[in-house]
Amino acid sequence: MLEASKIIYENNDWLTFILAFILIVLVLVKVLFNEKLLDTNTLFFSKKYLLIYYNKEKNSVFNLFQLLLFTIQFLVISIIIYLGFDFFEQSILGYKSVYLFISILIIILIYFGFKFLSNFFLASIFNLQKVQNKLQYEKNSYLNNLVLWILPLLIFCIYLNSFQVIFFKITFTLFIVLLCVRYFLFIANNKKLVFNHIFYFILYLCALEIAPLIIIFKLTI
């Protein structure tokens, strides 16, 4: 635990810069889209956000609001993975501090880019662009909610002087639990579509959710 604390202490400067950038983006989102941000933050409890905003944005799901929150998404997820490596694997990629973080950022961007292009390609082939847009919008919205909840806990993980490893374990466990909740809500919202095409849904999970993670994992160890 002392060794992990030393690692985090040594990296506080650049991590502070990353967190400051995330908070600046979040403040910008709040100024420009205050009500929308509040609805996003309660999405796990209410589908108000999906019911209201998708019908308004279905023709432009990649708008400024989504792009700003996507920036927060991949930075927060990268910090979680980075902290996990430093706490438990001692920089498994063979790099230290900021170099490890940059490597993780690139991998996360490749993962999201691969998923987006694969989804777009398959939706175009089977003429399912409208369905794919709706599903992608829901998954992305739930991930926005998850990241907004995890962000305050990450700040404690980085700057807490005592029990950092224990607190990170709690944060990481909550992150995994919320990911599971995200998938449960996603399936519940689209149960007719999922169960009427269960074979294609399983194929989708294997090909576009699990396979990219396995490929990236294999390439990085």
Image (cartoon, grey):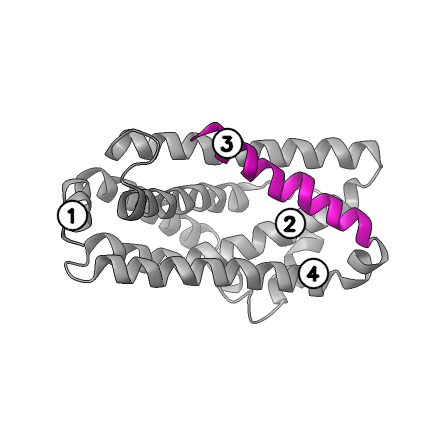
What's the residue at 49%, 35% (across, down)?
217
Label 4 Cα crowd, 10 Å radius (few <14 / some 14-19 / many 20+): some
Question: Would you say the magenta stretch is mainly helix, strand or loop?
Answer: helix
Label 3 Cα crowd, 10 Å radius (few <14 / some 14-19 / many 20+): few
User: At numbered mark 4, what does the secondary structure look like: helix, strand or loop?
Assistant: helix
Query: Which is nearer the eye, 112 or 165?
Result: 165
Label 2 Cα crowd, 10 Å radius (few <14 / some 14-19 / many 20+): many
Q: Earlier in the sequence, mark 4 or mark 3?
A: 4
Q: Earlier in the sequence, mark 1 or mark 3?
A: 1
Q: Earlier in the sequence, mark 4 or mark 2?
A: 2
Query: Is residue 18 something that shows in the picture?
Result: yes
Q: Which mark is residue 3?
A: 1
Q: Position of residue 27 (x, y in %)?
A: 36, 51
Q: Position of residue 215 (x, y in %)?
A: 56, 32
Q: Is residue 183 above or below residue 23?
A: below
The residue that mark 3 highlights is 218
The residue that mark 4 highlights is 187
Q: Is residue 113 above or below residue 210?
A: above
